[in-house]
Image (tube, helix red, strand yellow):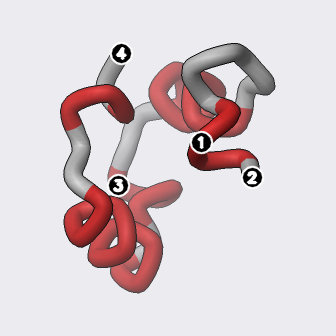
Amino acid sequence: TIHAGLDDTWMQALSQFGWRGLLPENERVEFSAPSGQDGEISS
């Protein structure tokens, strides 16, 4: 539920700085995994 607490601006900042490389493998999977809560980020 990490993404649930992230702000839009924070998400954009993470994207620009390459958050995929900053977060652990398991966290990266949560962000990429298709789920009801991830619908906002995916779309």
Foreground of the two, 2 or 21: 2
Kindly identify the residue that appears in the image at 35 percent across and 80 percent down.
Answer: 17
Q: Quadrant of residue 2?
A: top left
Query: As displayed, is residue 31 above or below residue 20?
Result: above
* Spot occupied by residue 22 in the image (x, y as percentages of width and height): 35, 55
Label 1 with label 2: CB-CB less than 8 Å: yes
Quick one: SS at disc 2?
Answer: loop
Distance from disc 1 to disc 2, alpha carbons, whole Å, reads: 6 Å
Residue occupying the point 75% across, 52% down: 43
Q: Does label 3 or label 1 sit earlier along the sequence?
A: 3
Q: Check disc 4 and report the residue beneath it.
A: 1
* Mark whose residue sits in front, 3 or 1: 1
Mark 1 sits on what residue? 40
Cβ–Cβ under 8 Å for marks 3 and 2 = no
For disc 2, the marked residue is 43
Identify whether 14 is placed above or below 43: below
- Total marks placed: 4
SS at circle 1: helix
Nearer-N-terminus badge (4/3): 4
Q: Earlier in the sequence, mark 2 or mark 4?
A: 4
1 or 4: tag closer to the N-terminus: 4
Gap between marks 3 and 1, in whole Å?
21 Å
Vertical position of residue 36 compared to residue 31: above or below: above
Residue 22 marker: 3
